[in-house]
Amino acid sequence: MQQLWEQGGAWLKPGYTPPARSSPHKAAAGQDHPSSCGPRGTEPPGTDNQDLQPTLGPCISNANGDVYLCTFNSLKSFDDPEPIFSAYRFCVLESRWGGSRRREGTGTARTLRTSVSVEGRGRESSALGSGRHGTSASCIHRAPGALDHVVLGNEEWNPWEGDEKNELVASQQRYEANLQMIKNARSHLEQTSLRVQIWGKAAIGLYLWEHIFGGHLQPPDVTAQWREGSQKAGKTYFSFITGPSVVPGYFSVEAENVVLVLNGREKAKIAYATQWLHYAQTLIQTHKIQHVVVVLLGNEQCNNEWIQPYLKRHGGFVNLLFVTYDYALVNEEDIFQWPLGVATYRNFPVVEPSWSMLHDPRSYLCNFLGTVYKNSSRETLMEILKQDGLDKLCWIAAREQWQPQETNESFKNYQDALLQSDLTLCPVGINTECYRIYEACSYGSLPVIEDVMTPGDCGNSSMYHSAPLQLLKTMGAPFIFIKSWKELPAVLEKEKKMSLQEKIQRRKKLIEWYRNFKAWMRQKFISTLEKSFLPSDKG
């Protein structure tokens, strides 16, 4: 980040030559009193006024009126809309005018200013300014503590001369005390700033970054070997890396806090995931990183015992675990449920609602495009749809075998079906939760969910008692939940009687809920990390 220096209230870029300073005896009327930390600075000549935009907060003085604390609310750069740092500035006023200390024919005021930026990107500087009758004329950069011979304008001033000696000693003491205050403030602010690097080694990492965080990746090409992005949220600066070139030991570890996104669905994926965990453990042992968080695409039957020994509660090093599906060990302390999200491994996009998506009538009452497994409830669903010609009212495309990769044509058909259907049917598979639920929400097509538990170890946890889909239910998902597909004909009959206006309002409600759900998950993720890794403020 480029260093910024203050000169007479103006923010200057490196290499900028300030205009010649007028004599301190010709200070313009109406200049700020040195007891003020000053207004927002003006841009140097020839610079874009959008480049640097500091915003100054209020000043606070002590009982003597000679110590001032200003808070810069934000300083934005042209390249990054997020505030890139805040700063404290202490202004110490040393006034010497009037009375017996007034020099004949002129009055002088000395202003000592010290500024510091946080997050380790700035450095301390002090400046001595000269003005008339308490008006600061300018500031010059000097090393901390230096109060030796200085030339200000055309006036030569020796701080150890005569009757000013005692006052300057007191000024030096005040300067040193305030410098210590600045160091303490910087130390506190550095403690309240968290840097987190996310290693995306499973497709749900893209759902976290692009869909929940709303982040971007460069390059945009989804087939790129290396992709990265960054953003600041709350007190935390996040960076994200993903791609085949992200290999243990062959990339820069840029934060002491790491979020590792892993796939734990099957044995081969687990073997790969453990390699990353061992690498993270080595970094912990060599003090390269301090904390590890795992976001885990869990097993669809919640068989996640393999991760337990790595958790800190069991003697491991993983501080926090966010895991998909209704994992019974979710406790909201160090184990949290995480949404499955959309199928980013099939490049399902971030969908921005359009006017037509919300308002246009849709051609189909419902849709189901998916695999029909033998002896499953999906076979029952197909049979019911064929009764009374209901399949003619819905977009149905069943297949007998699961296809992990979509063709361009099949993917477009799927998106069109979501966009053109009022309802999306979501029968259970290996687990009740499926990508289709979140993808339907993206297009405003209301999910109709088969609300039954599937075989395995998933179920209620100590925190939730509404499995399956306890996370979505807890967040008030406005879905249609049915226990049997035999209820579907009544649902579709009711759907036929709904007006377009009623459907429009329902779409808006669904899309708004999904937007809020993602925002809530983002905030929960950030606040959990900050609460766990930032030192608590004892006041």
Image (spheres, rainbow, N blue to C red):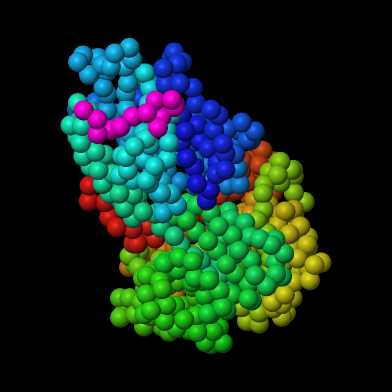
- Measuring from the top left, give residue 5's x and y in whole percent: 47, 40
The residue at 70%/66% (across/down) is: 222
Q: Position of residue 275 (x, y in %)?
A: 50, 84
What residue is drawn where x is 21% and y is 14%? 99
Seen in the image, is 199 located left or right of residue 533?
Answer: right
Image: magenta residue range: 151-162
Where is residue 132 drawn, in percent x and y? 37, 18
Residue 56 lies left or right of residue 188; in this view the side is: right
Observer-nearest residue: 39 or 354?
A: 39
- Can residue 468 be seen in this snapshot? no
User: In this view, which residue lies farthest toward the right?
Assistant: 409
- Quick check: can you spot residue 141? yes
Residue 15 on the magenta span: no
Q: Residue at x 42, y 43 (%)?
A: 86
Relative image position of residue 492 (x, y in whole percent) = 66, 55
Left or right of residue 346, residue 203 in this image: left
> Residue at left 62%, top 56%?
216
- Number of disc labels: 0
